[in-house]
C-alpha cells in the first residue's frame, strides 16, 4: 500500500526516534520505487519547526525525528497534519511499526479494494523475520548493519525481496516495454515543439477494454455447468476434510500425541 501511495504521488512523512532509521527508511522508499523515479520533493530529515511543510501542495517524501512518545503524539494529532492527511498525506510510524494511511476521499478505499498479497514476498518476509530473531543478526541494529554488514543469506533475501517488488510494480506499465519503441503507440509527436507527448488515455483505454471483456467472459463462464461443478467439487472437498479432521482416526492421532507429549514432559 505504501509504495502504491507513492506511485500515485501522495506525500509520505516518516517519523522515528533516530536519524539513522528515519533517513534509511526514507531513502529505501526511493530505491523500492524502481523502475520508477520519484520526481518530486525529497527531504530525508525535516526539522521539527518545519512541520507546517506537510501542507505543501507539492508531493513529498520527508523524515522527522521525534524526541519521545509525547512529541510523536503531538505530530500525529497536529491540526495541520490532520488536514494534510485529508488531502493525501500518509505517515510511516517507525516507533509503532505502523502505516497511517491517508484519509483522502476515494484513495484509501481504492487502495484497500485493489490490495493483493504477493505470496513470494510473504515467503521472503517470513525468512527475513527468522534471521532477525537471531541474536547475532546485524539486522537488529542500524549501527552494526552499516558497520559490519549482513550475512550472505540475509543479503540474498533482501535482494530477492527487491526483485519481487520491482516485478510487481512493473506490471502497471505493461505494454510500454514490450518493445524498445512500444511507448510510441501511446502518444503523438508534437510538431510545434518537436517533442513526443504521452497521452494517458491511449494507454488506459485498451486496459479498460481488456478488463471489460475479461469480466464478460467470467460472467458467462460462471453460468456454465462446468463452473458450477467446480464449485461443488470444492464444497465436497471442504466437507470431506471436515469429516476427516473430526473422525475417529483424527481423534486417535490427537489422543496419541497428547499421551506421548505428557510422557515426555513428565520425565
Image (cartoon, grey):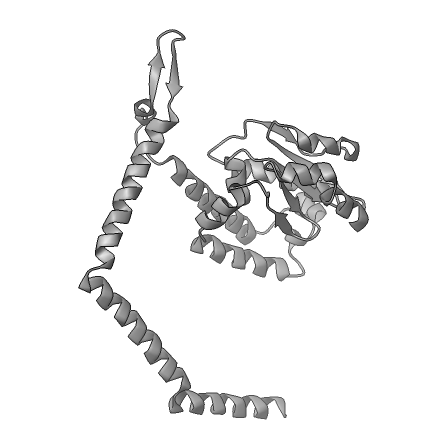
Looking at the image, which is closer to me, 82 or 235? 82
Judge from the rendering whether residue 40 lies leftward or rightward of residue 204; answer left or right: right
Q: Which residue appears at 31% of the width and 73% of the height?
A: 235
Q: Which residue appears at 66% of the width and 35% of the height?
A: 62
Looking at the image, which is closer to me, 190 or 67? 190
**The C terminus lies in quadrant:** bottom right
Judge from the rendering whether residue 92 lies leftward or rightward of residue 3; answer left or right: right
Q: Position of residue 249 (x, y in %)?
A: 39, 89
Q: Position of residue 251 (x, y in %)?
A: 44, 90
Q: Which residue appears at 75% of the width and 44% of the height?
A: 18
Q: Position of residue 91 (x, y in %)?
A: 64, 43
Answer with the quarter of the image where residue 105 lies. Answer: top right
Q: Residue reaching furthest front?
A: 105
Residue 177, visible in the rendered structure: no
35 lies above or below 231: above
Q: Residue reaching furthest left?
A: 225
Answer with the quarter of the image where residue 29 lies. Answer: top right
Q: Which residue appears at 25% of the width and 48% of the height?
A: 216
Tally the marks.
0
Q: Residue reaching furthest top?
A: 192
Residue 60, visible in the rendered structure: yes
Judge from the rendering whether residue 87 lies leftward or rightward of residue 181; answer left or right: right
Q: Position of residue 73 (x, y in %)?
A: 76, 48
Amino acid at each position: 500500500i505504501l509504495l502504491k501511495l507513492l506511485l500515485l504521488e501522495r506525500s509520505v512523512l516518516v517519523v522515528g526516534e533516530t536519524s539513522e532509521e528515519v533517513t534509511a527508511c526514507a531513502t529505501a522508499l526511493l530505491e523500492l520505487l524502481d523502475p520508477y523515479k520519484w520526481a518530486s520533493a525529497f527531504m530525508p530529515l525535516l526539522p521539527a519547526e518545519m512541520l507546517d511543510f506537510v501542507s505543501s501542495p507539492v508531493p513529498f517524501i520527508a523524515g522527522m525525528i521525534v524526541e519521545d512518545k509525547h512529541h510523536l503524539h503531538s505530530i500525529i494529532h497536529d491540526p495541520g497534519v490532520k488536514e494534510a492527511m485529508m488531502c493525501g498525506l500518509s505517515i510511516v510510524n517507525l516507533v509503532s511499526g505502523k502505516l497511517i494511511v491517508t484519509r483522502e476521499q476515494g484513495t484509501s478505499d481504492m487502495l484497500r479494494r485493489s490490495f493483493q498479497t504477493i505470496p513470494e514476498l510473504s515467503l521472503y518476509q517470513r525468512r527475513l523475520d527468522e534471521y532477525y530473531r537471531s541474536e547475532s543478526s546485524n539486522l537488529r541494529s542500524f549501527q552494526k548493519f552499516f558497520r559490519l554488514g549482513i550475512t550472505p543469506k540475509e543479503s540474498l533475501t533482501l535482494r530477492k525481496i527487491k526483485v519481487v517488488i520491482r516485478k510487481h510494480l512493473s506490471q502497471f506499465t505493461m505494454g510500454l516495454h514490450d518493445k524498445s519503441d512500444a511507448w510510441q503507440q501511446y502518444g503523438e509527436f508534437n510538431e510545434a515543439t518537436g517533442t513526443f507527448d504521452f497521452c494517458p488515455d491511449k494507454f488506459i483505454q485498451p486496459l479498460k477494454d481488456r478488463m471489460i471483456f475479461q469480466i464478460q467472459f467470467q460472467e458467462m463462464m460462471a453460468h456454465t455447468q462446468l463452473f458450477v461443478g467446480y464449485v461443488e467439487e470444492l464444497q465436497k472437498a471442504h466437507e470431506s476434510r471436515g469429516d476427516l479432521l473430526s473422525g475417529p482416526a483424527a481423534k486417535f492421532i490427537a489422543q496419541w500425541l497428547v499421551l506421548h507429549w505428557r510422557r515426555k514432559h513428565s520425565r
